[in-house]
């Protein structure tokens, strides 16, 4: 049932923290200002045919200039936490060497403004905007990029570590490695085999090195954000179940196993064949990758249904890293968002419980992204009545509550996103925001979902105060 906040909405533990999130390239704009260097997404957007309508993040939401207005919206919303990312090329224009003073000064101002609004900043160090100069030298395919990331981490930690207490090393390395290097739908836009697997490993290595730098700087709590998928076989056949297991390695185990079990997936050869030669791995890497974390970020939007589709390429060395003999099957009988993603809230519960059972000893979880893209057409007054988004959030919070009741240790939840923004290869016609952005005038207009979330958080805070006083 859609509509405004009501007492029938999910009741979650009083100590659970709530927030919302953005990412630098999607909201900041000002790509040529303040000494910022080009990123792989600047290059990707300028390549014809890559991004819908040839759009880019050049202006985006102009958050670089309007961050004060956006933090005021956060304060009105009443969130505990705000997750944002730092643009690596704004801090180090070429990805190495001395930092850019103007870039660091921007993040100084942003963090101080967030704290001044009574909100805790949660900082993501890498949300896909690799400096183009490093891509020109091989990017994530080469080991040196992990070392450069550690250097960048140390710079940011030294500057902001006195005020930021929660740090996320990487956002969704699956997308960086495989959507970027094997599917080609994200920057740098290539379709590779072994180099994509090398990129995956070097991203993990960069994460581990960054953890070491943050620990050395005593910067606070450290985690990583992964986007594991709840994978469902299309039928009960052995072939479809085997397809799901291969996909689970691609989507989930490649990341979870090295970080949380200290081992690489035991079925790599079955999944990737000749591509899985491990030539990019060095003794001691697992120890670096598997350092203990204070929390685990999970991004979740939808489940994926799969069936077996054997690969027939005669030369296995020409396979991409995502060519593992599976095929996605549409979900029937459920609503789909404008991304084409099925809305199946119970899969959120199932994923969290499966991870909790499959990886004993996981650190506490933050749901660092959850939300939906909807049509969001404004009415004659400019108001967006996004009841489908309200329903999505309400139902997924209820699903989160069921996971918590089942014993999953979840400490926080972030809606993606505060603002409509540049949605990567889709450009600007996919809107996830609680706040509508008029991209011509750059005006912000809170949607019905903004008001619902604000009222939900008001009620949650009241329950927290009551619990604290009990």
Image: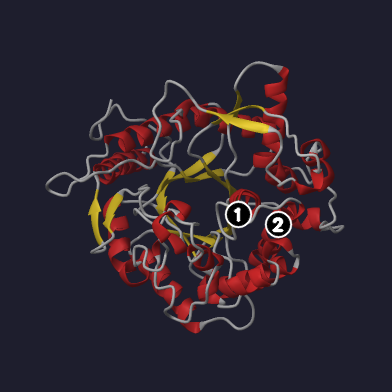
Q: Are marks 1 and 2 in contact (CB under 8 Å)?
A: yes
Above or below: residue 453 compared with residue 208 = above
Q: Residues within 10 Å of mark 1 (few under 14, many from 20)?
A: many
Q: Which residue extends farthest left?
A: 381
Above or below: residue 100 compared with residue 115 = below
Residue 422 in the image, given as x and y percentages of width and height:
40, 57
Above or below: residue 67 compared with residue 343 = below
Residue at left offset 28%, top offset 60%: 439
Asked which secondary structure carries label 2, the reply is helix
Residue 171 in the image, given as x and y percentages of width and height:
56, 54
Name the image quarter holding the N terminus: top left
Residue 74 in the image, given as x and y percentages of width and height:
32, 56
Q: Which residue extends farthest front?
A: 314
Query: Looking at the image, is mark 1 or mark 2 nearer the viewer?
Result: 1
Left or right: residue 170 compared with residue 259: left
Residue at left offset 62%, top offset 31%: 327
Question: How far is the residue under mark 1 from the one under mark 2?
Answer: 10 Å
Report how many numbered discs are placed on residues in the image.
2
Figure coloring? secondary structure
User: Looking at the image, which is closer to me, 226 or 249?
Assistant: 249
Residue 56 shows up from this direction: yes
The disc at residue 459 is: none
Toward which corner of the image does residue 228 lie, by quadrant?
Answer: top right
Residue tagged by mark 1? Answer: 180
Name the image quarter holding the C terminus: top left
Q: Which residue extends farthest right?
A: 283
Residue at left offset 68%, top offset 62%: 140
Residue tagged by mark 2? Answer: 199
């Amino acid at each position: 049932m859609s509509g405004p906040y009501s007492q029938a909405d999910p009741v979650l533990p009083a100590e659970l923290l709530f927030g919302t999130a953005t990412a630098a390239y999607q909201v900041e704009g000002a790509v040529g200002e303040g000494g910022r260097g080009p990123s792989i997404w600047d290059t990707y957007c300028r390549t014809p045919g890559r991004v819908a309508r040839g759009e880019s993040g050049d202006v985006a939401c102009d958050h670089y200039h309007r961050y004060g207005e956006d933090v005021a919206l956060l304060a009105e919303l009443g969130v505990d936490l705000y997750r944002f990312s730092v643009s690596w090329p704004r801090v180090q224009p070429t990805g190495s060497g001395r930092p850019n003073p103007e870039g660091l000064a921007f993040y100084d101002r942003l963090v101080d403004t967030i704290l001044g609004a009574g909100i805790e900043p949660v900082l993501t160090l890498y949300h896909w905007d690799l400096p183009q100069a490093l891509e020109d030298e091989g990017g994530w395919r080469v080991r040196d990029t992990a070392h450069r990331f550690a250097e960048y981490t140390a710079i940011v930690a030294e500057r902001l570590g006195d005020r930021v207490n929660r740090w996320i090393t990487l956002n969704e390395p699956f997308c960086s490695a495989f959507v970027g290097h094997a599917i080609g739908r994200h920057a740098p836009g290539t379709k590779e085999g072994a180099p994509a697997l090398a990129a995956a490993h070097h991203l993990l290595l960069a994460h581990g090195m960054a953890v070491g730098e943050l620990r050395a700087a005593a910067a606070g709590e450290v985690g990583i954000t992964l986007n594991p998928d709840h994978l469902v076989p299309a039928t009960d056949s052995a072939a479809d179940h085997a397809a799901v297991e291969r996909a689970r390695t691609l989507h989930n185990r490649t990341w979870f196993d090295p970080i949380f079990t200290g081992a690489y997936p035991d079925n790599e050869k079955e999944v990737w064949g000749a591509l899985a030669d491990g030539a990019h791995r060095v003794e001691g890497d697992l120890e670096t990758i598997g350092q203990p974390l204070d929390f685990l970020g999970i991004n979740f939007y939808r489940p994926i249904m799969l069936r077996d589709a054997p690969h027939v390429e005669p030369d296995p060395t020409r396979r991409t890293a995502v060519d593992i003999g599976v095929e996605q099957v549409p979900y029937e009988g459920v609503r789909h968002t404008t991304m084409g993603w099925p809305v199946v809230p119970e899969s959120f519960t199932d994923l969290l419980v499966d991870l909790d059972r499959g990886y004993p000893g996981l650190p506490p979880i933050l749901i660092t992204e959850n939300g939906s893209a909807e049509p969001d057409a404004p009415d004659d007054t400019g108001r967006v009545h996004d009841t489908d988004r309200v329903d999505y959030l309400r139902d997924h919070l209820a699903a989160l509550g069921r996971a918590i009741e089942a014993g999953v240790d979840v400490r926080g939840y972030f809606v993606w996103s505060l603002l409509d923004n540049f949605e990567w290869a889709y450009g600007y016609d996919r809107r996830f925001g609680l706040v509508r952005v008029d991209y011509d005038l750059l005006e912000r207009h809170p949607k019905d979902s903004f008001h619902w979330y604000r009222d939900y958080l008001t009620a949650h805070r009241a329950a927290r105060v009551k619990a604290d006083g009990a």
